[in-house]
Image: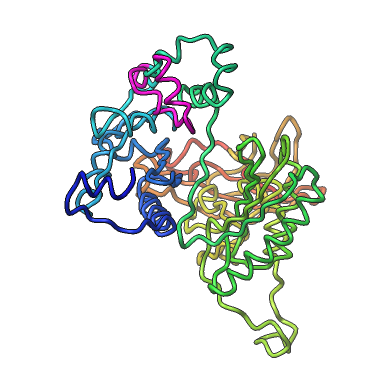
């Protein structure tokens, strides 16, 4: 209403100039604070915030084994309470769809509303049609026709409704009911390093994407350099014209801000991207970063004068990891255990470990898991086998070294308290070398059943 009319109705009315930009900035700061509840948060100007709590609500449930939907009520109570202590009044609602949550938060009778999963349609049926976020005079025109509730709108035939009011009414209704997907533009934490490029015309080709990747990589790496950070994980987001987002994630084995290396990793993943009807913007986000201080790599670097600089294999490891998957690229590391099958573990290729294998006790390059039984001939208690049969093939032992006695780890399992293995390194007539062991020491029956096994091949 006009200001003069408002002052006439309310004497002493406090009037302040509107500052939309300041309000929007404040809303964004409040949305960033809401990241404590879920990683997907979006501002809904002028006065709303979306929080996608899918997969997060159960963390607030007091139950020791909560269901995925449990905990939403506790989360909303905590949110409203914290905002109230900060002097901010809020209305909160949770529903299956963003449109349903919008309508319940603004037009429900209770300040806090929780629609059970699958009941969004019934929950919003009695709400005013203005809860569908209809623009212009559409909501007023519907009310003049006697259509005041969302439930009444659901019962009307779609054809005449579209001819009278256009596509917007049915589109908003379908979004609220979950018939049409409604994407949210997530807000990134303020400390996240990212760069975004929008396009006048949608892009469709891999060559165009590659050119944009080169620019984004340079911009992001420049920001990383200023922050003295190195990225460990990058997310490249393709914002399609239909509102959906295609995402590509690449990682590095150690912190890096090499734009050329990053661009190469991202270009190799372009074949997995479906541009749909076109991509209207691309955004590169650093979702994981560590501290990275510049290193001296010229001729004055320590060790470089002697030609002993360690080769940098991280670039190769990054390309293999992003092409094959993180679980398929690993290296073997020693574990402080005398039992052979427990003395090795898989670790990331660039992870540093302290444990090493003893050089005086060589181990075969290939261990069989589990050890395969063989038939062997040997004199008890400590003579090597003279021959053994493995996979129906007989091998005559020409040379042997042993035994190396390994006891069970009694602190792990009580059954291993007396277990003993005697290992021999043997060579057959053709020069093949095997690692055999006998279960038991050959004297005490409690130490093993005297069976023979092939555990490794040199």
Q: Is residue 400 left or right of residue 334?
A: right
Picture coordinates of residue 89, whole percent (x, y)? 24, 45
Q: Quadrant of the N terminus?
A: top left
From the viewer's perspective, is residue 70 above or below residue 453? above
Name the one closer to the observer, 33 or 138: 138
Residue toward you, 133 or 358: 133
Front residue (pair 368, 158): 158
Report which quarter residue 120 is drawn in.
top left
Residue 125 part of the magenta-drawn span: yes
Relative to 427, is 377 above or below? above
- Whether residue 424 sits left or right of residue 92 in the image: it is right
Q: Quadrant of residue 167?
A: top right
> x and y percent of residue 266 in the render?
71, 53
- Residue 187 in the image: state x and y as whole percent: 48, 50
Q: Residue at x 80, y 44 (%)?
A: 205
Q: Position of residue 133 (x, y in %)?
A: 45, 32
On screen, 357 above or below 365?
below
Asked if residue 18 is among those painted magenta in the image, a careful observer would answer: no
Residue nearest the viewer, comparing 423 with 309: 309
Name the colour scheme: rainbow
**Residue at coordinates 50% horizontally, 26% vertically from top-left?**
172
- Choose top left, top right, bottom left or bottom right for residue 25: bottom left
Per the rendered image, the range of residues in magenta is 122-146
Residue that appears at 32% across and 40% down = 59
- How many marks the image carries: the answer is 0
């Amino acid at each position: 209403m006009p200001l003069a009319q408002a002052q006439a109705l309310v004497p002493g009315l406090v009037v302040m100039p509107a500052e939309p930009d300041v309000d929007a900035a404040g809303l964004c700061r409040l949305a960033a604070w809401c990241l404590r509840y879920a990683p997907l948060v979006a501002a809904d100007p002028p006065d709303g915030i979306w929080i996608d709590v899918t997969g997060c609500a159960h963390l607030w449930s007091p139950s020791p084994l909560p269901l995925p939907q449990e905990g939403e009520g506790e989360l909303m109570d905590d949110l409203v309470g914290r905002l109230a202590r900060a002097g901010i009044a809020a209305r909160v609602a949770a529903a299956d769809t963003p449109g349903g949550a919008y309508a319940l938060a603004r037009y429900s009778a209770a300040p806090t509303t929780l629609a059970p999963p699958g009941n969004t349609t019934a929950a919003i049926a009695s709400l005013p049609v203005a809860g569908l976020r209809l623009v212009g005079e559409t909501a007023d025109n519907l009310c003049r026709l006697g259509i005041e509730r969302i439930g009444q709108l659901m019962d009307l035939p779609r054809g005449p409704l579209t001819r009278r009011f256009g596509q917007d009414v049915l589109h908003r209704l379908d979004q609220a009911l979950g018939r049409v997907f409604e994407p949210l533009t997530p807000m990134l934490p303020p400390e996240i390093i990212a760069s975004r490029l929008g396009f006048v015309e949608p892009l469709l080709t891999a060559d165009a994407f590659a050119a944009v990747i080169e620019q984004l990589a340079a911009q992001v790496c420049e920001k990383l350099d200023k922050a003295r950070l190195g990225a460990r994980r990058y997310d490249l987001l393709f914002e399609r014209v239909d509102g959906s987002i295609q995402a590509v994630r690449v990682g590095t084995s150690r912190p890096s801000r090499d734009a050329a290396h990053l661009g190469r990793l991202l270009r190799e993943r372009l074949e997995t991207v479906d541009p749909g009807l076109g991509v209207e913007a691309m955004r590169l986000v650093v979702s994981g970063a560590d501290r990275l201080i510049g290193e001296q790599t010229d001729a004055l670097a320590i060790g470089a004068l002697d030609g002993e600089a360690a080769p940098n294999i991280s670039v190769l490891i990054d390309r293999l990891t992003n092409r094959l998957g993180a679980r398929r690229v690993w290296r073997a590391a020693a574990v402080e255990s005398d039992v052979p099958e427990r003395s090795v573990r898989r670790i990331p290729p660039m992870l540093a470990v302290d444990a090493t294998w003893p050089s005086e006790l060589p181990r075969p390059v290939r261990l069989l898991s589990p050890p395969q039984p063989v038939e062997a001939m040997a004199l008890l208690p400590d003579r090597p086998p003279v021959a053994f049969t493995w996979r129906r093939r007989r091998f005559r032992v020409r040379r042997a070294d042993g035994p190396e006695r390994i006891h069970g780890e009694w602190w792990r399992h009580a059954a291993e308290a007396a277990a003993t293995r005697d290992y021999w390194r043997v060579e057959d007539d053709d020069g093949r070398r095997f690692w055999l062991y006998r279960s038991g020491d050959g004297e005490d029956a409690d130490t093993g059943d005297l069976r023979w096994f092939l555990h490794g091949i040199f």
